[in-house]
Image (spheres, rainbow, N blue to C red):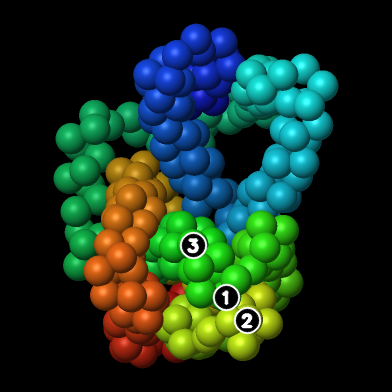
Amino acid sequence: MAGLLIVSGSSYGAGLAASFPQLVVARGVGGMGSALFISGLTNRILRIIEPSAMGSATGSFRASFLVGASAGPLVGGLVAARFGLGAPFIFYATGLLVATAITWVVMKNKTLVDDGPKRSPLEALRAARPLLGDRRYILALLATLVSWWTVAGPAQTVGPVFARAVLKLSSSEIGLAITMLSVGEILILLVAGRASDRYGRRVVLAPSLAVTAAATAAIGLIDAGSAWAYFPLMMAIGMGIAAVGAASGGLLADAIPREGSGAAVGVNQMAGDLGYLTSPLTVGTLAERSGFGAAYIAGALPAALVFLASLRLPRRTTP
């Protein structure tokens, strides 16, 4: 609830900002709130879902975010066109207040029963330390990093520049290509989640990492004469990272005790943030200095390395 309220306040601030620095500060504060409520949501899912069903639960959870990510730009555009560019922030902030009220109603009688012993942040970190020796947890962290690294750098930041400069695609065609990421995710999410529960995390994780690495590297090999290949490759990347996310969510549930660990979930989110922050800088710099081919190979490298590590997972990681 604290995270939702922080993001709501920051969004009101962004909608009412009178200068660019004010907007930047408001959005930065919103990032802190997002970290809080996403970690809280993930930890809640880990506590109420059996590990044997966690792949399916993770797929449904990610699918709900995709629905928002797909509908958000459309709704935001309509609101902005009618009420001004600040209005979508106000609209979003008010929606978060509604979400906070729903959270209070749904969880008010469950918090004290379900949340277990209270720990200080330092105690929580100490309690989570043994997980750093668990291969399942480490692979979950690496898979999360790979997902956000691939989305942030090769797909969404360098991708549009490559599509315009090399493939000569129009703005609408570039928008369609980025949309193919979400299409690929939606097509595979629930199937991948169920498969990771039924057949094991490795069976889903390893092939999806291989697909992600291969599709990312292949984009750097196409040119204007084969620009059509950009669209299915973007869809393949979406499918790959969606399946990686479903399997890594299952690995988290396998590794983290049923009473949950906010610290362990927070570290997992930090792994994703690390990939999201470093990928655009790394891949973008390589694209400028060494060309798009080298940039896309670098973009594919983390997925390829984690693929090799995933082969050492046992086929079954849950009872």
Residue in view at x 56 percent, y 10 percent: 16
| Up-down relation of residue 262 to residue 234 (above or below) | above
For marks 3 and 2, the one nearer the N-term is 3
Q: Which mark is residue 231?
A: none
Mark 3 touching mark 1, by CB under 8 A? no
For marks 1 and 2, the one nearer the N-term is 1
Q: Which residue is mark 2?
A: 227
Q: Quadrant of residue 73?
A: top right
* Percent x, y of residue 209: 45, 81
Q: Quadrant of residue 298?
A: bottom left
How far apart are the two marked residues, 3 and 2, measured between alpha carbons? Answer: 14 Å
* Percent x, y of residue 253: 46, 61
Q: Which residue is mark 3?
A: 161
Which one is in front, 40 or 114? 40
| Up-down relation of residue 280 to residue 316 (above or below) | above
Q: Secondary structure at mark 1?
A: loop
Mark 1 touching mark 2, by CB under 8 A? yes
| Up-down relation of residue 271 to residue 196 (above or below) | above
For marks 3 and 1, the one nearer the N-term is 3
Q: Secondary structure at mark 2?
A: helix
